[in-house]
Image (tube, rainbow, N blue to C red):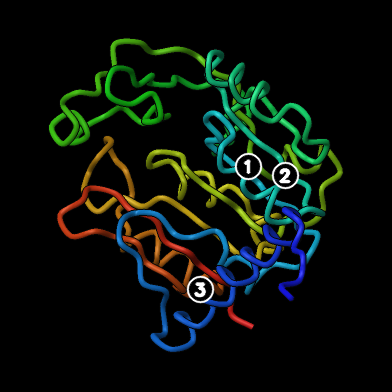
Amino acid sequence: MIPFISPIMFKQLSQKIRYHFSEYLFNKYGQPRVKNERISKIVLKNYLRAHPVIIDCGAHDGSDSVTLADLFKGASIYCFEPVDELFTRLIKNTNGYNNIFCYPIALANQDGTMDFYISEGGSDGSSSLLEPQEHLKDHPDTFFKRKINVLTRTLDSWAQENKIEKVDMLWLDMQGFEMNMLMASKIILNTVSVIHTEVSTRETYKGVPLYSELRSFLEAKGFSVEIEALPAGWDMGNVLFVRDK
């Protein structure tokens, strides 16, 4: 007789199978295999506690935060998205998640306001505090015709205002401004265990720190590379850093 498995039990079993398969690849090959610029969020189970505090900077429409909230039921997730139309979508998509909190500001390296270059056309997810450079050649279907002024806060200032003393993970998609923000996070960065960040392999935006520079900075802060998702020939990719024990 075949035992009955409810839809909820089936979903939980499927998640466990995917998680253990991902962990097996990690243990066997040293780093999980990646086919593109994406890193499976399931591997984060290896590094984060059950109730992590997560920062999603460059939250866009909230899809990453929703996945993280489903993966870590006890997480507290703080999202930052300064573009009005995207923030509206972020609020809509995270509605119903009482552990996701949204802020219409950009984390940066200063408190105040800064110019923000808006991407349109092929991508509405390439907006940046940095002016586009090689991005215009690599992605000609994406254009930057608008520049707006957005409210900015440093991570340390925001954390102090909101009484956040520890952050477990930074999920960063800041289109080249990641290192600028991190360098200004002199307090909170010391509490972080995991960083998932987008990186640039060439000058996608004017003055953007390249991956090698960002990697050296984070290694000096006690982090090591766990997973690289840098497809050959691509201008950008993602890297998972974990603090050394």
Residue underneath mark 1: 65
Residue underneath mark 2: 77
Instruction: Give the CA distance from mark 1 to mark 3.
Output: 20 Å
Residue at 49%, 86% in the rendered image: 27
- Residue 22: image tag: 3
The image shows residue 131 at horizontal and vertical percentages of 31, 27
The image shows residue 127 at horizontal and vertical percentages of 39, 27
Residue at 69%, 61% in the rendered image: 10
Image quadrant where residue 225 sits: bottom left
Q: Are marks 1 and 3 in contact (CB under 8 Å)?
A: no
Q: Which amino acid does the dot numbered 3 rest on?
A: Ser
Q: Are marks 3 and 2 in contact (CB under 8 Å)?
A: no
Residue at 48%, 64% in the rendered image: 240
Foreground pick, 210 / 122: 122
Between discs 1 and 3, the one toward the N terminus: 3
Q: Residues within 10 Å of mark 2 (few under 14, many from 20)?
A: many
12 left or right, relative to 241: right
For label 2, the SS is strand
- Is residue 180 shown above or below 25? above
- Residue 41: image tag: none
User: Hey, which residue is sitting farthest bottom in the picture?
Assistant: 28
234 left or right, relative to 171: left
Image quadrant where residue 208 sits: top left
User: Closer to the camera: disc 1 or disc 2?
Assistant: 1
Between discs 1 and 2, the one toward the N terminus: 1
Q: Which amino acid does the dot numbered 1 rest on?
A: Ser
Q: Which amino acid does the dot numbered 2 rest on?
A: Ile
The image shows residue 44 at horizontal and vertical percentages of 60, 65
Between discs 3 and 2, the one toward the N terminus: 3
For label 3, the SS is helix
- Is residue 140 shown above or below 88? below
